Amino acid sequence: MRRSRAACCLLLAGAAIVASTACSTGTDAVAQGGTFDFVSPGGKTEIYYDPASDRGSIGDLSGPDLMVDGKTTSLSDFEGKVVVINLWGQWCGPCRGEADDLEKVYEATKDSGVAFLGINVRDGQKDKAQDFVIDNKVGYPSIYDPAMRTLIALGGNFPTSVIPTTLVLDRQHRVAAVYLRELLAEDLQPTVERLAGEAA
């Protein structure tokens, strides 16, 4: 009886840890034209792709800019740059937790050919998402995509079912790394700096 209680407590503790580090989108991760049902191999929260393999570039990712009315922001705006794409929502606790760290890496690497692009998802009230950007002093642009339609550009080949998700693209905009959890600056910056050091 004591063993089964202890096992139950361990399972509950494990579930709490997972819940504290990411917000799953579950069945809400469905966009017009497709579903995003990539399953992380072995439940990993960090996935790295071999630079020597054909990682493949992602599709034409673009959408309305969150902060500038009438403007379209696109991945193609950052041709030849390493790009960090962060999927976030103001409703997501881990997104709030990592905002300062992402901004720190952005400021540290933007002069070495690195760009950051946010994709704001599942925020039906645009003004709340804009407040998040202002309150957290986020210096890089975000696409406003409450229905997650822009993620069709990923073609279902990369995980998008957890928020926050961070994808790091090399200079050819091939996916080099995916993080399915809240990040600290020291988690992200070495990967970004390594890719920025690769030949264009």
Image: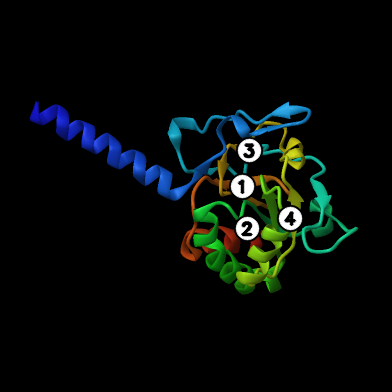
Percent coordinates x, y for residue 84 in the rendering: 65, 56
The front one of 185 and 133 is: 133
Chain-order first, disc 3 or disc 2: 3
- Whether residues under marks 2 and 1 lie with C-beta atoms below 8 angstroms apart, the answer is yes
The quadrant of the rendering that contains the N terminus is top left
Chain-order first, disc 2 or disc 1: 1
- Whether residues under marks 3 and 1 lie with C-beta atoms below 8 angstroms apart, the answer is no
Badge 4 amino acid: Lys
Badge 3 amino acid: Ser
Q: Which of label 4 and label 1 is nearer to you? A: 4
Query: Mark 4 highlights which residue?
Result: 126
Q: Secondary structure at mark 4?
A: helix
Query: Mark 1 highlights which residue?
Result: 176
Chain-order first, disc 4 or disc 1: 4
CA–CA distance in space, label 4 to label 3: 39 Å
Residue 63 shown left or right of residue 109 in the figure: right
Badge 1 amino acid: Ala
Label ID, residue 195 = 2
CA–CA distance in space, label 3 to label 1: 10 Å
Badge 2 amino acid: Leu
Q: Which of label 3 and label 1 is nearer to you? A: 1
Is disc 4 surrounded by few (<14), some (14 to 19) or many (20+) residues within 10 Å? Answer: some
